[in-house]
Amino acid sequence: MIVGFPPGGAADLLARPVAQKLSAALGQQVVIENRAGAGGMIGTRDAAKAAPDGYTIVMLLTGISLGANTGYDVNKDFAPIGLVASTPIIVVSNPAVPAASLTDVIALAKKEPGKLSSGTPPAPTINYFAAVLFNLMAGVDITVVTYKGTGPLTNDLLGNHVPLGFNTIPASVSNIQAGQLRGIAVAGVTRSAALPNVPTAAESGLPGFEAVQYYGLAAPAGTPRAIVERLNKELRGVLSSDDMKKRLVAEGSDPVPGTPEDYAANIAHEEGKWAALVKKLGLKIE
């Protein structure tokens, strides 16, 4: 299972328990390979070129089609297996930052334009688009600093090397619960069950600021349908187990079991939605 981000990030934290459970269900070990770089595009490109025999699968993330010169077409070069989980982006800060709410962050950014910075994985991740969208919707100039993944970003947030972050909940939840990071706002329709005290962006005065990350598994295009269906069956079984559901919810994700067709529709919808936004905003993704 190829994961296009470093160990310790949200994609990796989600992939490992799923791979462990799939190993038991399939009767053979599913090994995680972290092939990080270019916002997940390097690992995704490798997966697209792999033999379509069912022995290489990849964790895909929303936005993976939006980079420049990706080397693959997410709608044509993959056979969707199934959605795994979803999680909203969360705005987090080091506790030393004098901002306890989204209103405070906006006020601080407007007080000294360009001096405040926020960390995020690079384009084409939804984290990155959320950071850019936040600047536009809030009317602020916060410098966006990119990291290889949410793991390195979280480490720099903890060290206060970057004051703000547009992170994922799984990469942040334990540090927020321990008081080592501050949860500012969740970019979802509702609050996270794992962090019930962190308000949504709408509750914090920025309605319409929503960014949800979807994770799913796919195989290279041309993988036999029987193999895709077997992998989907076992994945749905994994996600439907009580222990996995409890684990994912506790870590800030919502399990989303479904069919390969469900995931194909999700890819088309989400990639299309963000592509339209990128075009509307005139964003250039290198």
Image (cartoon, rainbow, N blue to C red):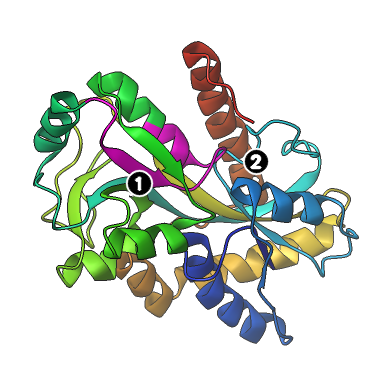
> Compared to 284, does 238 lie above or below?
below
| Alpha-carbon span between mark 2 and mark 1 | 20 Å
Label disc, if present, on residue 166 of the rendered structure: none
> 248 and 276: which one is in front?
276
Q: Residue at x 37, y 65 (%)?
A: 155
- The quarter in which the N terminus is drawn is bottom right
Secondary structure beneath dot 2 equals helix
Residue 272, above or below 150: above
Instruction: Determine whether 183 is above or below 248 in the image.
Output: above
Q: Please provide percent x and percent y for residue 254.
A: 38, 57
Report the residue at 59% width, 47% height from top: 39
| The quadrant where residue 172 appears | bottom left
- Give the residue type at disc 2: Ala
Residue bounds of the magenta highlight? 113-131
Circle 2 is placed at which residue position?
Answer: 264
Q: Quadrant of the C terminus?
A: top right
User: Is 120 in the magenta?
Assistant: yes
Q: Secondary structure at mark 1?
A: strand
Q: Position of residue 273 (x, y in %)?
A: 51, 25
Q: Is residue 23 left or right of residue 204?
A: right
Residue marked by disc 1: 88
Q: Nearer the viewer, residue 111 or 45?
A: 111
Is 89 situated left or right of 31 in this image? left
| Image position, residue 58 (x, y; %) | 69, 59
Q: Quadrant of residue 207?
A: top left
